[in-house]
Every structure is written in C-alpha cells, then in structure tokens.
Image (spheres, grey):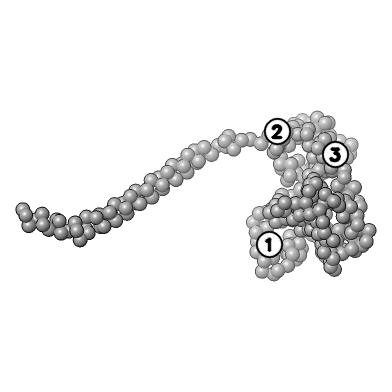
Amino acid sequence: MQGKITDFSIPDIFQLIASQGKSGSLKIRVGERETAFLFSDGLIVDVQPDRRDPAGMIGAMLVDGGILTGEQLRRILALQEKSEKKLGEVLVGQEMISREALARYLTLQIKESLFDVLRHREGEYRFESFAVRPPLWMGTPIRADVLMMEGMQFLDEYAIYREKFPPGDFRVARKRGEKIDTGALSEEERAVWKAIDFSPEPRRIFRKAGITWFEGVKGLWFLMDRGLLEITRPEEKADEPGRLVREELARRRKVGYLRAAAWTVAAAVTSLWVYTILLSEGATRVFADWVRFF
C-alpha cells in the first residue's frame, strides 16, 4: 500500500491499518525526511524518526529531560554500537532508566512524531506488511484512533496557544512571590509548573514533565493566563561576559595564521623564481661571459 497523502490523508491511513489489524511499517516521507511508525496487530508500538532531526531521537529526549547526561549518552551509544542492540535495551540493561520511564518517553516520541507529520499536507506514504514484535519496554501499545483524536486536537488548537508567546525561542520563569495551590491546577499545568524549576527552556521543561510540545505550550498558556509566569526572550550571545574578547582574539589568531601562510607561499614562489630564472643555463652563461669580460 502506497501513495500520496494528498489523495489519502494520514488519519485515514492510520485508521485503515488499525481497522484491519495489520502489522508492519508505515513510512511517511515529506521532502527528504522520512518517519516510520511500527504497528503490531493494528496498534502503534514504536517509531523511527528521521535521523536528520537529532532532537527527536530518544537519546536526545532523555538528555533534555535530565534522565541522562550528554557524557552518559555518548557512552551508552558506544555500547549500543558494539552490542548491536536497540538503545532502549542497552539503557534498561545498564539500569540507566526503568522500563516504565522508558515506556513513557517512547509514547512521547510517538506522539511528537505524529504531530510533526500531521502538519504537512504533501508527501508520500508506504506501508510494508511484516511481523512486528513490540519492544519489551513498551507498556501499553497505542490505539491509532485515540492518537488521531489527540492529533486533531493539536491541529485545531496549537496555533491558538502558540501565538500567545514570542515567535521563535523564548524562556520561562515563575513570578517571584506568587503562591499557588497546585491542587487547583490541571494535570498539564501541574506537570509544567513543577518542571519549570528544572530549566527555563520550554523544550527541556516539557521533556522533564514527559509531555508533548503541544501539551506543554497549552499548559504554559494557562499558567501565564493566571499571572504566574514571566516569559522572556533568551539573552543575546553578544551579552555573554568575555565572549567578544574571545572572538576578537580568535579573529586575530586567524589573521596571523593567514599572514604567515601568505609569507610562506611568497617565499616559496620567490625561491622557485630564483631557481628557474637566475640559475637557469642561459642565465649562468650570461653571468660567466660578464665575469670574463671584466
């Protein structure tokens, strides 16, 4: 089964696979990017995001969420390469994460990958049927109809909440002195409120809370509407102490290297000219005749 998503929409494709209880891989290609969703008996059990988007890989998600450090991830990836096992299997085997926590992040990865492909109106799909064994750490496979309902909500509401924040990158902080009864907050709001202490960066806040970008932005909006948050733009890099000085020193070193290289080339060219012109057979004969004359 294959075709264009302009002719057969992504929700319809998911619904067909689910209703027929199929197992296999659904690859959705948009431009150069390709995302593969894995089904087992009509249920979504795994996803393989495009590797050109490192932020969508499970390892990067765990680092963003504070589960792993960058150094730990590099070490685990080295072990994975040697063992030829999946990253999740290595992480659980090394007791770096529990099966339950890994299952939550895998579900989060599936949702974010779906929300990403749903934003596109053009592309191609291809379903290949084969037996799929769900990952051992996948707690509960995801029903396609339930995931599609969340996806439709994302398409309908995301732009409304996102436009309340500055375009591009922004930072989040609690307002000082604000007291709040967390029992009065929704589940999304509580998750975001608690994770704000972890980082001011929205992506890391949402990864720490274990919620999608859409759910996180929605939770931020409600907290901001309650007057509990301060939203700012990130500081310009030019304001970092000592950065300009370091850049100027680096620029001077680079200029120095270029000048030294230019002088070296000039010296080599001059030497070659002396050898080929002044020390040629004709030049030597002229010089000898001049000596004999005087």
Is residue 235 visible to us here? yes
> What is the x, y in percent for residue 140?
88, 59
Element marked by disc 1: helix
- CB-based contact (under 8 Å), mark 2 and mark 1: no
- Give the Cα distance between marks 2 and 1: 35 Å
> What is the x, y in percent for residue 178?
79, 31
Q: Earlier in the sequence, mark 2 or mark 3?
A: 3
Q: Nearer the viewer, residue 220 or 113?
A: 113
- Give the Cα distance between marks 2 and 3: 23 Å
101 is higher (above) or lower (below) than 179: below
Is residue 207 toward the left or the right of residue 145 in the image? left
Q: Give the crowd class for mark 2: few <14, some 14-19, many >=20 residues within 10 Å.
A: some
Q: Residue at x 65, y 64 (%)?
A: 78
Q: Residue at x 68, y 58 (%)?
A: 73
290 is higher (above) or lower (below) than 90: above
Quadrant of the image occupied by residue 42: bottom right
Which numbered mark, 3 or 1, is in the foreground of this view? 3
Residue, disc 2? 232
Q: Residue at x 94, y 58 (%)?
A: 19
Q: Give the crowd class for mark 1: few <14, some 14-19, many >=20 residues within 10 Å.
A: many
Q: Earlier in the sequence, mark 2 or mark 1?
A: 1
Amino acid type of the residue tagged 3 in the rendering: Glu
Q: Residue at x 74, y 41 (%)?
A: 202
> What is the x, y in percent for residue 129?
84, 66
Which numbered mark, 2 or 3, is in the foreground of this view? 3
Residue, disc 1? 76
Residue, disc 3? 157
Amino acid type of the residue tagged 1 in the rendering: Ile
Amino acid type of the residue tagged 2 in the rendering: Thr
- Give the Cα distance between marks 3 and 1: 38 Å
- CB-based contact (under 8 Å), mark 3 and mark 1: no
